[in-house]
Image (cartoon, rainbow, N blue to C red):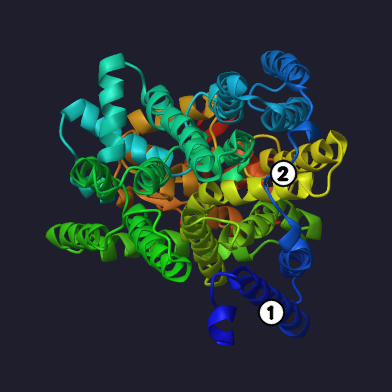
Amino acid sequence: MKIRRFFGLEMIDKVMAFIGLFIAILMIILNILIYNSFITYFIFSIIFIVCSLYLLIGERLNIKFDKKILRRNFTIFSISFFILYIGSLLVLYSRPDTYERPTVYFIFIILMSGFLAGSCISAKQRDIPLIFLQLFLLALNLGWSHLMIVPGLIGIDPWYHYGMTSRIVENFFIPENYHYKDKPAFHLIIAIVSILSTLSYKFAAMLSVSLGQILCNTMVIFVVANYLFKNHKIALLAALLVILGDTHIRWSYMPIPNAFGGIFVLIIIYILFTKYNPFSRLSTIILLVPLLSIIILTHTLVSAVMAIILFVYYVSLCYRELISGKTEVIKTLLIPCFYILAMYGYWMYKKNTFSTFLIFFNELDLAFISNPIMLSSTVIIPQYERLFPLIGNYLFFSLAILGILYMASIKGSNKSFSLAILSLTLILIPFIFSISEKMIFQERFEYFAFIFLSIPLAITLFLLGTYKAKNSIRTYAIVIGFVLLLSFFSVMSITGCVDNHYFAPVTGSKMYYTQSELTGSDFFGRNTEGNIASDFHHGYNPSSSLFIHIYGFEQRNMNNLDLSLNSGNFPYDESIKIIRHDHIREFKRKGYLSPIIPDDLTIHLSNLGFNKIYGNNEISGYTGGTLNG
């Protein structure tokens, strides 16, 4: 009886807290004995504190509070937000560097996030539309300000998707030589918008998938949280936390199918929680079938995540209902079973698409990990710079655990328990990939974790902010203070920001091209008939090569010039050698550039017998060379 009670409803949250405490202590001990990683100390110390705090005060925490605690300061917060918003636009317009947002812009963004957090917890029901307007404006500013200051796309994968989508627009059929030929939903939507609006890929993607992610993620998270907890303040705060996640910021300016599929995952979860009942089973299933089909046709990893979520959703509800004796949601095992059969059947029909796709992603991951250039740096990266890009993620994930424990406790409902287990599952998956060093998989699973964990994190802030609070000062200080801290680490991280690397001068990378670089690339793309040697992402990487996806070059015609920049040896291989000057500066800063290469690379190449055939402010091209170069 005691064992049943221990693992039953009354003790499940404490059991989970004790398990978290044990894992944190174990990992800290292992870190002392083996790893000695400051990052490991940091994350598991936070988990230890959060689990200990819940065991100490968890029984006294409650989202029901005296509404008089939060006086009406909504007007002040809103006016301050719009003043800062206008200021951020003026700063962007008058920026001294064409391709970089100044640091003062980010100060405005961080302060705007804090004031918006104050608006969320002081708002009345009638204020919700205005707050949503602010949420959308902030999200667009965070993501699209990246895209609006550069002439092309940002990142690696978008050039791959551009290549496939542009061929669909030009030829009106799906090209066969792309891995996404069997999962074209993302590309078809952008292609349709591009054809109907005559916009380029960049703006068509912004107005379709990027805008869709921002609108749907914030709105669905709000309605799910408001439905589960009947508290619009928590729901608004959760919507704000979604858009402040650095991975969510990245996929808004770097839209990819993985992030686009997250829209439908959220909508399906909302439908299962709210719409599936004895009176509307057929209509709900009719609604779910196209949504689940779109997921299968969007991305293999999203399909796998959806399968995991459906089974965890079903099992967690079964457990909770068995213990509590209450049935809040009509559920069926048929939905996850039929979905998995449909997903697996489609993969088999397309000749084992899943294994092929995993091999493709694994090859991309190995290309980064096993690249000898990445192991040749002589620059010592400061400890704080290794930790800085991760602090926002760790704070987000770790503090959300307190909210998960509350949702899993007897104070929560069957539905909140299920959402808590889903959120916990989505924390563990990227953690497993992190341990196995599969960084590409980790990034993509983190996106779903950010979305789902926004609700438990909002609950954490609300619980701590209102705990024994007799006035609004402490509540505002805790909630606004954390949001300010989170927004700082998110918007200034190398994930959330690719242009201003004030806090990451060594590890930060520029992931876009200037107009001069695009002009030079266009010259070589249109006039070169033989081989081209350029840096890895610009020319050689099959996922990001401008020459492959814009000008139709074959992979066999591309050579990786980074190997020569690292060794100082430029062999004569009858290829046009393209040098991006900013890439040289970045290589030198990170310690990848060979010490035998002088400051003026032209002199070094001239001594090796190469002739300069093209040059502008940002890019140069060389041909010729000697056999022993």
Mark sitting on residue 22: 1
Viewer-proximal residue among 280 and 55: 280
Residue 321: x and y, percent?
42, 65
Amino acid on which the number 2 mark rests in the picture: Leu
Task: Kindly state the secondary structure of the residue where label 1 is placed.
Answer: helix
Residue 278: x and y, percent?
25, 49
Mark sitting on residue 116: none
Mark sitting on residue 486: 2
Asked if residue 86 lies left or right of residue 177, the reply is right
Give the number of the mark in front: 2 or 1: 1
How crowded pointer 2 is (Cα within 10 Å; few <14, some 14-19, many 20+) is rated as: many
How crowded pointer 1 is (Cα within 10 Å; few <14, some 14-19, many 20+) is rated as: some
Outermost residue to the left: 349
Q: Is residue 370 visible?
A: no
Question: Which quadrant of the view contains residue 472?
Answer: top right
Asked if residue 545 lies left or right of residue 390, the reply is left
**Which residue: 22% across, 42% down?**
290
Viewer-proximal residue among 471 and 254: 471
**Which residue: 58% across, 53% down?**
565
CA gap, disc 2 to disc 1?
27 Å
Amino acid on which the number 1 mark rests in the picture: Phe
Q: Is residue 75 visible?
A: yes
Q: Are marks 2 and 1 in contact (CB under 8 Å)?
A: no
